[in-house]
Amino acid sequence: MKKRDIKILLVDDDADIIEIVRYNLLQEGYQIFTASNGKEAITAAKKELPHLIIMDVMMPVMDGMEACEQIRLVPELQNVIITFLSARNEDYSQVAGFEAGADDYIAKPIKPKILVSKVKGLLRRLKDQKEGSATLNVAGLEINREEYKVVHEGRELVLPRKEFELLYLLASKPGKVFKREEILDSVWGNEVVVGGRTIDVHIRKLREKMGDDLFTTIKGVGYKLDA
């Protein structure tokens, strides 16, 4: 996919930040759209179907967390990459961001060149998607990677991108213990720096949707899916 075909939605109530980020990403050749709060972001996302959303957390009308959760409920936006760009850099804020469905969490302030580099890293995932149909059938699960579709015991589940990729990884080799470093590298990639707690959050959300018995925690090592 060429840069001119990639759509990025910027969401922030600070006009100066919007202008700085917009300018630098336009220089890279991306299509840029903007919104000043979470409610506008949802409307713009439904209209433009962006590949990436860069969103602030603290905004009027509707904050970024709620907007992210609502965007993840829109079928056409299930696979959009969402990253928060926020001055709220506490651990609990980052965890809340991932729980809301974000793929990454970037702290302000950040130099424009570094932000552009992070954006390139996030968008690289569009190129890294595996081609062809690959369906896994294991432990009462049917996982179709091409359609990002999961059926658990006859019930279709809608999973955010990172939850899906984590589940697919674990299900690709049932019984194998995937080390935390291996999970981070495979699901999040080397270009994105996230903590081990990110994995815990996503595993917990999968357990809430599919039950505790499907996943086993190996303390100090990682996780496995029980066939």
Image (cartoon, grey):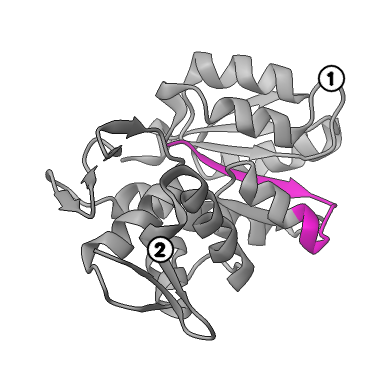
Q: Which mark sits nearer the N-terminus, 2 or 1?
A: 1
Identify the magenta region.
79-93
Residue placed most toward the observer, 13 or 160: 160
When the figure is inspected, residue 43 is found, relative to residue 5, above or below; the finding is above
In the displayed structure image, the side of residue 84 where residue 212 appears, left or right: left
SS of the residue under disc 2: strand
Q: Is residue 85 magenta?
A: yes
Q: Position of residue 199 (x, y in %)?
A: 54, 64
> Which residue corresponds to the image point at 70% horizontal and 42% vertical from the top-left?
21
How far separated are the C-alphas under marks 2 and 1? 39 Å
Camera sees residue 147: yes
What's the amino acid at mark 1?
Val
> Which residue corresponds to the image point at 66% horizontal and 54% vertical from the top-left?
105
Outermost residue toward the front?
213
> Which residue corresponds to the image point at 40% horizontal and 59% vertical from the top-left?
213
> Which residue corresponds to the image point at 48% horizontal and 58% vertical from the top-left?
121
SS of the residue under disc 1: loop
Q: Position of residue 211 (x, y in %)?
A: 44, 50
In the displayed structure image, the side of residue 50 where residue 158 appears, left or right: left
Q: Which residue is mark 1?
A: 61
Q: Which residue is mark 2?
A: 215
Q: Is residue 203 magenta?
A: no
Q: Position of residue 117 (x, y in %)?
A: 56, 59
